[in-house]
Amino acid sequence: MTKIGICDDNSTLLQKYQKMVDVVSKECDWKIKSYAFNDGEDVLKMLIEDEECLDILFLDILMRKMNGIETAKKIREINSKVIIIFLTSSEEYIFESIGLSAMAYLLKDQLTEDTFKQTLSKAIGIVNESKNDVLQFKKSGRMYKLSYQDICFVKIYKGYCYIHHWDGIIYESADASIANELIENGFFQVNEQYLVSLQYIGRIEKDHIVLSDQSKNEIPIDKELSKQLKLTFANFMIQKAKREISNGN
């Protein structure tokens, strides 16, 4: 899921940009979570609490309290990775922002939905590439990063996600959004409690699957999900075989 912030002290424009993000995201089937800010101080407060809370920030340059240039400078002291896209009413302010690693500058009076869509698409592409198929989650103030390829399955129990690594280590997280991220990255929810990596399925039996990792765990399948699991797994294996052939393996 991509976390997008929009900061503008003009409430009418703020709503306009929020709507554009929502419309474009639905058109492109992007999984996003958006946040609206009336001034730069609110952005900084959120980043101080959690420096990983934003992937992309649309930032107005001309704001009454703390302007966008000053806000961006302070953001860079906290987070060097968040993608900043400046919103401005004049080209003259572009030169003031040199050195802040902004991805783009959008002129408000010339901003069309197509331009907005292209810019957001590029930003999301950069975010996805930088994450490099890694699941990120926080526990006790510490940030963990695990490759999706190293996760065998996840058990959801009493609001917690228990992430089973291939080497036997179990990581715990209270972040419920993990489930959605896993489903988008090669996992299948076989029952109410378990999400299983398709690459670690050894075989599918009538009412359970057997994992191919060292644990050889057996995980039950909900009856109504059995058919969809088999179709999804078959497609996964076909795509895997195609990749191996194209790579000459």
Image: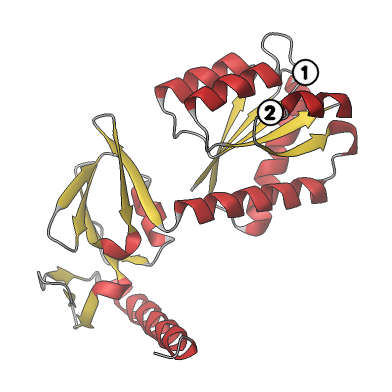
- Residue at 40% x, 79% y is 236
Quadrant location of residue 239? bottom left
User: Which residue is rendered at x = 44% and y = 35% of the image?
Assistant: 52
- Residue 90 visible in the snapshot: no
Q: What residue is shown at x 76% (from left), y 19% (from top)?
A: 10
| Depth order, front residue of 98/85 | 98
The vertical placement of 233 against 174, above or below, is: below
State whether residue 100 is above or below residue 155: above
Q: Which residue is mark 1?
A: 62
Color scheme of the displayed model: secondary structure
Query: Tag 2, which secondary structure?
Result: strand
Q: Position of residue 241 (x, y in %)?
A: 41, 88
Q: In the rendering, at what x and y percent does residue 133 appear?
A: 42, 58
Q: Position of residue 67 (x, y in %)?
A: 70, 15
Name the element at disc 1: loop
Which image quadrant is residue 235 in? Answer: bottom left
**Of 185 and 191, the residue lying toward us:** 185
Which corner quadrant holds the C terminus? bottom left
Which residue extends farthest top? Answer: 65
> Residue at 36% across / 46% down in the picture?
136
**Residue type marked 1:** Leu
Compared to residue 28, the image places residue 2 above or below, namely above
Q: In this rendering, is residue 138 above or below 38?
A: below
User: Would residue 76 be visible to someone looking at this image?
Assistant: yes
Q: Residue furthest front?
A: 99
Going by the numbered disc 2, the residue's amino acid type is Leu
Q: Which residue matches tag 2?
A: 59
